[in-house]
Structures are given as structure tokens and as C-alpha cells.
Image (cartoon, coloured by chain):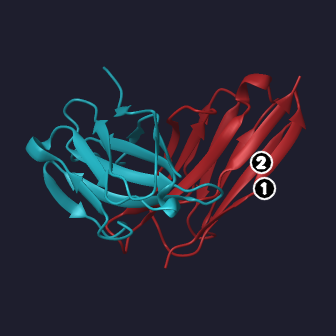
Amino acid sequence: EAGVTQFPSHSVIEKGQTVTLRCDPISGHDNLYWYRRVMGKEIKFLLHFVKESKQDESGMPNNRFLAERTGGTYSTLKVQPAELEDSGVYFCASSRSFSLNNEQFFGPGTRLTVL
Amino acid sequence: ELKVEQNPLFLSMQEGKNYTIYCNYSTTSDRLYWYRQDPGKSLESLFVLLSNGAVKQEGRLMASLDTKARLSTLHITAAVHDLSATYFCAVADMDSNYQLIWGAGTKLIIKP
């Protein structure tokens, strides 16, 4: 089966601009997660979708970040307007529903650089 | 608040040697994960540990979990160059919808 894919792999934008990241989970995986790793820091949870619903968005840093998963398939994460501190690698992961261990499968990440 | 501490953060070793990476966490959890990341690549799931005393092995890697001590170890036996990568542990926070709380990662370099 195809793995989790993310687009773009890299994005370089200027402060104040808008960027939209996309994640395509593994087909049939209802759970979709977004994470971020800022340079030199730990990977941090951002939010969790179950199908099209936001199950947990407690990790979203502020209201400049908007995540959607219309139709319960792919997800987008929009940053508007971007700030310097938003730079980092954004990972997406997916997992099956009703999985005892909730093993999450990760995409390659999008490296975002805000200048 | 669940905190995860991983050590060492950096490890350089010779092929053929054994070593252990440690993952301590601060509050009760029943799920712990180990991931591997090669530079520029995605996080690859290595092990999922669900119960006290769980031990899993895959090739030269063996992971164990002691929920009472809140400690997991990732043991590398007779290291080979191909195992060079960054290894992360992540613990499910039972008080926060099972969010994964991550260790800082251990960058492992194995010299031929």
C-alpha cells in the first residue's frame, strides 16, 4: 500500500505570506495527525483528525494555523500569515481506527523556512 | 504534564559494539513507541510496546518497557553502519487524548 505523502517537500516563504501544506494519509486510515519539529527542539503534536472531525487540536500554536480535512481524506495545514518562528519540519501521520496499538505511519515531512 | 527524556542525545560508536539508548518518562502510560529517522526521510516505526515487561526484537535492535520504572530501552547488538540514524521514543499521554510526547532523539553514528 502507498505510504503517507506530503506536499511540498520544501517551502521557502517570506514573513507575512501564506503557505498551505498537504498530507495524503494511507488509504483507509481514519486517524490523521499533524506534528512539527522546530530546529533543535522535540517533535510536537499539533492536532488529530478522526475522519473529517478535529478530535484534538490542543497543540495548535495559535490562530494563524488552520487545518482542514474535508471529506475525511487528505488534509491541509495553512499558515497565515507566516512568522519566523513557524520555520521547521511539519510531519503528517495516519493510523487505522480501532487499532489496539495506534501505530502511526509518518510522511516524509515538509520543511518550511520563513525568511 | 508528561515529559519524556531520552539519552544520550548523541552517540558515536564502532561497528560490532553494543549500546543502549534510554527513554524515561514522568507519568503513567501504557504505550511507548520507538521510531527511526534517516536524514531527510520520514519517521519509520520500529517498535510498539504496550505492557510492562514487553520485549520486542528486530534484527540487531531490541526494545523493552518497564512501566513501573517508566523506562524503555533500545538495545543495539553488534552495531553495523546501516543502523546509523536518529532514534526517537514517543510516549502516549493518557491524560491528553493519547497524544504522543516525544523524546529529543538520539543521533547514532556507527563507524565502520
Could you say which is closer to the camera, residue A112 or residue A91?
Answer: A112
Pinpoint the chain carrying mark 2.
Answer: B
Which residue matches tag 1? Answer: B8
Identify whether A88 is placed above or below B3: above
Classed neighbour count for the residue bearing mark 1: other residues with Cα under 10 Å, few (<14), some (14–19), many (≥20):
some
**Is A45 displayed left or right of B13 in the figure?**
left
Give coordinates of residue B28: x percent, y percent: 49, 73
Give coordinates of residue A10: x percent, y percent: 47, 36
**Residue at (56%, 72%) from the top-left corner?**
B3
Could you say which is closer to the camera, residue B62 or residue B89?
Answer: B89
**Residue at (84%, 38%) from the top-left corner?**
B18
Q: Which chain gets the cyan colouring?
A: A
Q: Amino acid at mark 1?
A: Pro
Q: Which mark is residue B20?
A: 2
Q: Which chain gets the red colouring?
A: B
**Residue at (41%, 35%) from the top-left corner?**
A107
